[in-house]
Amino acid sequence: MEQCNQFKHLLEAIKKHTDDVRLSSECFAFGTIKGYTFRLFQESNNEAYLCIRDEKSVCGMWSAFYNASEIDEWVGAITNNEKMKYEPELGQAIFGQPHQEFGVSGLMAAALRDISREWERVMWNRWQRTIDSPFDNTGAKWSCDTFEVEAYSWAECDCDDFDEEWSQDKCTCGYKPQTYNFKYKDIEVSWYKYLGRGMSQNRPTSPSEIAEMLESCLNALKNVK
């Protein structure tokens, strides 16, 4: 089987961003890009696609790409997030719940604010009164099949002071750190006290992923009864 035009197109797009490209056959390539494993396939119907694996996600998810612009967008998002390693403010670093590895982009923050506003509107229409928002400093939590959100937790360990750094296996009071405030699929976002402050996320997210997340969450809120 000869390489189709789409396979060649994707192969050239990958080579722009990595030198680790290996061909095990005329129509199958593999390697790494930005530290992530990729595989490039060509099907018998002469259609090709690239898969990149996110080893940091819960299930090691594979994302599919079909053209150079999608690959360029993904690489751009990874590059931007590599520059966005999160550094917490002093109070959060000392007293706050655990934070995630990466800072939150303006696009992600805007999407979460849109979801928060829509949640408040839907809850008002449903109950005809103000419901404590889990996006604020209220202690509230809420979930549906699509996403879950939990207000910042003020819980802390009541054990005697540790001689060494705190660890879950030595804690006897039942305290568990809050691992995230917002979760959609394998995307986890944490904040400090309320949405918009001290925000961090567990992995890089491309603009298209954020757009998909926003659309899915808003659609889920339409079905709240």
Image (cartoon, rainbow, N blue to C red):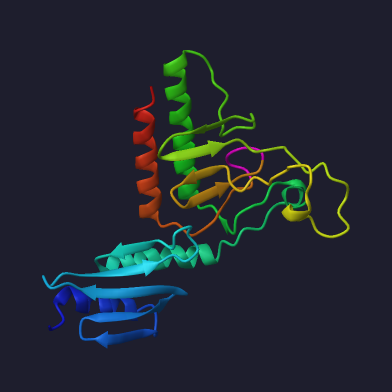
Q: In which image quadrant can residue 48 be found?
A: bottom left
Magenta stretch encompasses residue 81? no
Query: What range of the chain is rendered magenta?
Result: 193-197
Percent position of residue 101, x then y: 59, 59
Vertical order, 76 against 212 (above or below): below
The residue closer to the viewer here, 81 or 225, is 225
Q: Residue at x 56, y 34 (%)?
A: 135
The residue closer to the viewer here, 103 or 180, is 180
The residue closer to the viewer here, 86 or 30, is 30
Percent position of residue 8, x then y: 20, 79
Q: Residue at x 37, y 68 (%)?
A: 52
From the viewer's perspective, is 179 left or right of 145? right
The quarter of the rendered structure image containing the C terminus is top left
From the viewer's perspective, is 111 left or right of 12? right
Percent position of residue 185, x then y: 43, 49
Magenta stretch encompasses residue 195? yes
Percent position of residue 92, x then y: 72, 48
